[in-house]
Image (cartoon, rainbow, N blue to C red):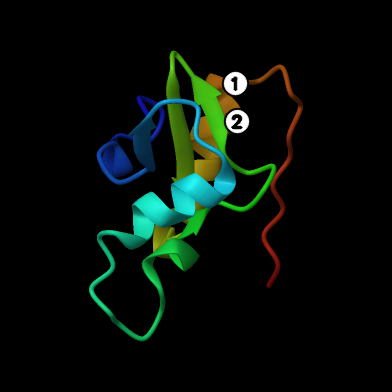
Amino acid sequence: MEAIPWRKNQLFEVFDGELSADQVYEQIMKNDTGGTVPRAKRFFCNNGEVFHQGGNAYVLSNQWGQKTLDTADSLAKMFPNPGIEVNPAM
């Protein structure tokens, strides 16, 4: 979250416990306001996308907008070892 200070508080949804994807979906939907798009569609929360650290379950937002490339650049600089490259499609 430190690599992306402009999204620090909106980068992840964090839940207590090592929840499954189904359990995370249920938790996210508790705060759904009934809009056009279900709130859970705004996060990577399917099987294999929920990750766990320190007894918590985390799901990453998929709502990036105009700062997507800035975010990718910041992450690449902070974590150079994975060797990830980002090439925007035009």
Query: Which residue sits at x=37%, y=66%?
Result: 39
Q: Is 44 left or right of 86, judged from the image as shown?
A: left
Q: Quick one: quadrant of the N terminus?
A: top left
Q: Nearer the viewer, residue 8 or 37?
A: 37
The location of residue 4, given as percent across then percent down, is 38, 35
Q: Residues within 10 Å of mark 2 (few under 14, many from 20)?
A: some
Q: Which residue lies furthest to the bottom in this view?
A: 36
Q: Is 87 left or right of 69, judged from the image as shown?
A: right
Q: Can residue 70 be seen in this view?
A: no
Above-or-below relation of 70 to 16:
below
Which residue is identified by label 2?
A: 76
Above-or-below relation of 84 to 47:
above
Q: Can residue 21 be seen in this view?
A: yes
Q: Nearer the viewer, residue 84 or 21?
A: 21
In three-dimensional space, the C-alpha distance between marks 1 and 2, rounded to whole angstroms, equals 5 Å
Instruction: Tell me, yes or no, whether the two marked residues, 1 and 2, touch with CB atoms within 8 Å.
Output: yes
Query: Which residue sits at x=50%, y=27%?
Result: 18
Q: Which of 19 and 54 is in front in this view?
A: 19
- The kind of secondary structure element at disc 1 is loop
* Amino acid found under the numbered disc labelled 2: Ala
* Amino acid found under the numbered disc labelled 1: Phe
Which residue is identified by label 1?
A: 79
Query: Which residue sits at x=36%, y=35%?
Result: 14
Q: Is 48 left or right of 36, judged from the image as shown?
A: right
In the picture, residue 51 is in which quadrant? top right
The location of residue 22, given as percent across then percent down, is 55, 51
Above-or-below relation of 12 to 26:
above
